[in-house]
Structures are given as C-alpha cells and as structure tokens.
Image (spheres, helix red, strand yellow):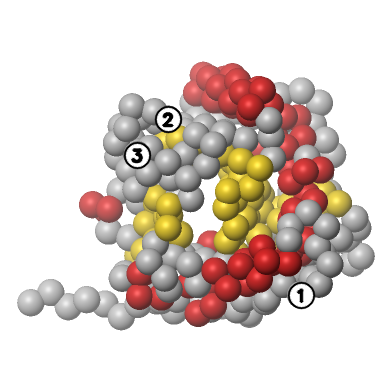
Amino acid sequence: MTTVPEPITNAMPELERALSFHPVRNPSPKSLTPEQIAYFNEKGYLSPLDVFTASEAAANRAYFDDLMARAEANGWNDYAINGWHRHCQGVYDLVVEPRILDMVQDLLGSNLICWGTHFFSKKPGDDARVSWHQDASYWPLTPSKTVTVWLAIDDADVENSAMRVVPGSHRHGQIGFHRSASDEKNVLNQTVIDAERYGDPPVSLEMRAGQMSLHSDLLLHGSEPNRSSRRRCGLTMRFLDPEVRAYHGWNRNAITARGVDPADHWGNVARPVGENVPPRESN
C-alpha cells in the first residue's frame, strides 16, 4: 500500500513569515462599493471588474500578440514573460493604469507597490494545469498582504480554462500542500489536495477581455488544461502596501505605482523606453 506523505505546512521554514489574512477596513471606498469590500473579506476575491473598453482590450491583445511573437523569437515560452515591467514600456503602463490602481487602492490603501508581473498564456490544446495552490506559500514576503490583479487579455471562460478559486479558503492561513507529481503537468510545483474542503464550492472566474479580478494571496486557486480551440491569456500584477517586507532581494524590481514607500524598502524601477525583450539567459 502506498503511503501518502504528510502535507508540508511551511514552504520556507528558515524565514519568519506571517501568513494570515488581514481583512480590509475601508469604510469609504472610492471605486469599489462597501458591499464589494465585505465580499472580498468573506470570499477572498472580486470578479469580474470592468477596466478597459472593447477597443482598449483589443489593443492590449495586439500588444501581447506582438510581445509574445518577439519573446518566442528570442527563445522564451508561453509562461516566461515574467517580471518584464522592468523591460517593456507596455507592461509598465498597465501596472500604473489609474483605473486599476483606483480599485486596488480601496483594498490596500493609498501607497501601492507592484512587485511582480506575469503573463499566463495557455495556447489552444495546452495540457498543462495550475494545481490548487496559495500564492503566498511561494513568496518570501511578510506579512501576507499581496493583492493580485488578473487582467484578461483574452476572453476567459470554463471552456478555455478560466481561473478557478475556492471562495473563503483565504481565511485558513497557510494550508498544507504536497510537491506536485510529474503526471499533474503542473506549471508550478505545489498541490493542495482536496482543496474544496477549505471553502465554498469552486467558482470559475469568467471574464471578457479587458475585465479583471482581484484576489488575496492566500486564496486557493488554479486552472485546468486548455482543451479548447482558443487561447486564454491573462496578466497578473502583484500589489501590496509598502509595510510588507521581502527576503532574498524580492524588493529590488518593484514599482512604486501610487503614493510613496516611506521606508524606501522597495525598489522603484524607471519606466522603460520601448519594448526591450531580454536575451534568454538574462531573465
């Protein structure tokens, strides 16, 4: 009989990290409603949220199509456009889009740091999945106060592998996980078993291109293989209040997207000039 190993309860035991949800306390939000704030606190996410017009969404898609084509020409794959806000003007400009920041500010406050960006592009027929996981488990940050924007570059629905979440799972703090088995074809390397028992039944975050979702860094989420004939691409942007501290140099490539960083802990990369696809060996 095969013995199932005990779940791992701390991915970075050598670091002092506080992994627990901090409810938003904002009695006077400016872009979100009080009801949306309450929903985020209870469920751990908001979706869908309108950001870009149809024509702007088409421009975002054309931008990504061009960037992806040039990335592939330099040897990068579909999941490799990670942290390119420091190389590419177009990615940087999405990070500082006021309509996005207005909603994020209602959850995090007037000082906003974006420490990471990542395009997740699943081509038609892509058999890779993102297994159930919590973002905060992977990150050398404390406390766990990152809010992720997932901006739809393409329409996202159940058929083409929209992101799925377990509502309410963010309130459990760190949830035990296993190292992913090779046959999962997981894009990442952590898997929470029986994720559904940590919250409400899973929900697929279906969105039109140009809409976005917001989710807590402790919310269980993932996505299935894309068995459709359509691509599903989204841009994640990771925001936090500058009171959060980073280990291992993770503070170096940030953007002060709004307000100030009082302690000057986080980097503030300059807006790139043009679209500078980095050489394969440099990222």
| Residue 175 in sight | yes
Q: Which residue is mark 2?
A: 231
Relative to 209, 107 lies left or right: right
Q: Give SS at disc 1.
A: loop
Q: Amino acid at mark 3?
A: Glu
User: Would you call the spot at circle 2 few (<14 residues within 10 Å), some (14-19), or many (20 or more)?
Assistant: some
User: Would you call the spot at circle 1 few (<14 residues within 10 Å), some (14-19), or many (20 or more)?
Assistant: some
Q: Give SS at disc 2.
A: loop
Q: Amino acid at mark 2?
A: Arg
* Residue that appears at 50% across and 23% down: 72
Seen in the picture, residue 135 relative to 160 is either above or below; the reply is below
Q: In what quadrant of the picture does the N terminus appear?
A: bottom left
Q: Which residue is mark 3?
A: 159
- Among the two numbered marks 3 and 2 on one chain, the one whose residue lies closer to the N terminus: 3
Distance from label 1 to label 3 (Cα)?
36 Å
Question: Would you say the residues marked 1 and 3 are in contact, meaning their CB atoms lie under 8 Å apart?
Answer: no
Question: Would you say the residues marked 3 and 2 are in contact, meaning their CB atoms lie under 8 Å apart?
Answer: no
Distance from label 1 to label 2 (Cα)?
38 Å
Query: Residue 124: where, in percent of width, then height?
Result: 35, 29
Q: Give SS at disc 3.
A: loop
Query: Residue 121: where, in percent of width, then height?
Result: 48, 36
Q: Amino acid at mark 1?
A: Arg
| Residue 136 in sight | no
Seen in the picture, residue 34 relative to 229 is either above or below; the reply is below
Q: Which residue is mark 1?
A: 25
- Among the two numbered marks 1 and 3 on one chain, the one whose residue lies closer to the N terminus: 1
* Residue that appears at 75% across and 53% down: 103
Relative to 214, 7 lies left or right: left
* Residue that appears at 79% across and 71% down: 26
